[in-house]
Amino acid sequence: MKRTVIAAAMALGALAMSAGWANADPVDDELEIDGVKMITRAKAPEGHPFDEVYSGWLFREADTRAMEADSIENPAMTAVDDGEAMWNKVEGTAGKSCASCHGNASESMKDVGAHFPKWDASTNKPINVELQINKCRTEQMGAEALPFDKGGQQELTTYIKYQSLGTPVSIDLSQGEMQKWWDQGKELYYTRTGQLNLSCASCHEVGMGKMIRADHLSQGQVNGFPLYRLKSGLTSVHNRFRGCIRDTRAEMPKAFSDELMALEVYVTWRGTGLSVETPAVRH
Amino acid sequence: MKSGRTILGAFAGGIALAVAFGVASAGEMAPGDIKIEDNMVAMSVSGADGNAEEGAAAFKNRGLGNCLACHVNSAMSKELFQGNIGPSLDGVAERYKPEELRAIVVNSKAVFGDETVMPGFYSLDVGKHVREDLVGKTILTSQQVEDIVAYLTTLK
């Protein structure tokens, strides 16, 4: 059986080469945005299934890659502008904006986004940028929490993460019970779901570098989020997770549920060392 | 809509065949009753013969087999976007007997092991949290499995 599979795979390799498909490996290319060199390949942290971690950018077509490299062409740069407007907008009963407490985001938020999710002692759970925004809104501004993906949540998150452009992702698993959430996230990453019976690892670990129909499978890294998808616009991490789970023909967990927060902790760790690319461009 | 029509088509094909060849309606096998021995399923799981033409349609239909998501099939070179998560199916009929191909399509895990990423198309051994409307349902009907197997046997 094994031999047949290998022989078939070799035949396929020949076919793929003759058809000129760009597959198998991440592309050999370098990403620089506004003069800042991005780390798109990094040595994996200890205990990682791969030796090297790769940005999803390396798996996209040349035109998509070029679009991210040029911030004039990047369609999500308007989201950064919209996020900046929200940063400065007074909302809620306290008469404050984000800027009232944090001043200039290019200083106060520099590199901050590269280290989320963090431990939040008050809720005894990990917190991501979206939930931190809601925490500030409800506790400091007297404003309503923003619903998932609405009311500028994605734009403001994009603006905050953009202040870390180029900074390597790293999260602190020694805080609170982060390690426990990492364990749960890992468990979920390898859990097969849905009628198609696939786990995250089926596609992004076993299938990494292969083609699934027209899609070149990446490692499923989150360092570029929120990012711009050519087919559907600005996309948050939890939206992406939900979409991938839906594609296994499973029920989708709710955004910000314990499941997706645990996955975010674990998947963020899997991309340790990659530059924040927010807002990245993908197909 | 499109897949609905294909399903109806497959049914019509099955009935027509059964009538034409007077196949004794041994009846459909429930997924749980199928025995995979020596990597084979000996008998038709629908109780009828497969139709290769219907099988080709179900094979490429994204809502049914969607086999091209993971497999190259040069016989369908007009179909764009053939994946390569699994091996090419070119000449697969020379590598496997029909009974083996049936076992692979019915429940690939029984043949390749639990680690394979290929879904079981007529199996209820599925992942967690299956979408509510799909609970207890297989990806393909028993007749679609037979049709696809009939199609695979043409790949020489």
Image (cartoon, coloured by chain):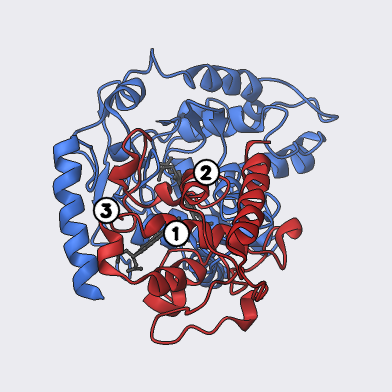
Residues packed near mark 1 inside 10 Å, few (<14), some (14 to 19) or many (20 plus) = many
**Which residue has dot 1 on it?**
B150
For discs 1 and 3, the disc positioned in front in the rendered view: 1
Which quarter of the figure is the N terminus of chain B placed in?
Answer: top right
Q: Colour of chain A?
A: blue
The label shown at residue B61 is 2
Q: Colour of chain B?
A: red
- Residue A172 location, quadrant: bottom left
- Residue A152 location, quadrant: top right
Q: Mark 2 or mark 1, which has the lower sequence index?
A: 2
- Residue A21 location, quadrant: top left
Q: Nearer the viewer, residue A1 or A251?
A: A1
The chain to which mark 2 is attached is B
Q: Position of residue B42 (x, y in %)?
A: 47, 80
Residue B52 lies left or right of residue B125; in this view the side is: left
Under circle 1, the secondary element is helix
Which residue is depicted at the point 21% across and 39% down? A27
The chain to which mark 1 is attached is B
| Same-chain status of marks 2 and 3 | yes
Q: Say what amino acid the circle numbered 1 marks.
A: Ala
Q: Mark 2 or mark 3, which has the lower sequence index?
A: 2
Q: Say what amino acid the circle numbered 3 marks.
A: Asp
Q: Mark 1 or mark 3, which has the lower sequence index?
A: 3
Under circle 2, the secondary element is loop
| Same-chain status of marks 1 and 3 | yes
Can the viewer see residue B140? no
The chain to which mark 3 is attached is B
Above or below, A63 against B81 in this view is above
| Same-chain status of marks 2 and 1 | yes
**Which residue has dot 3 on it?**
B90
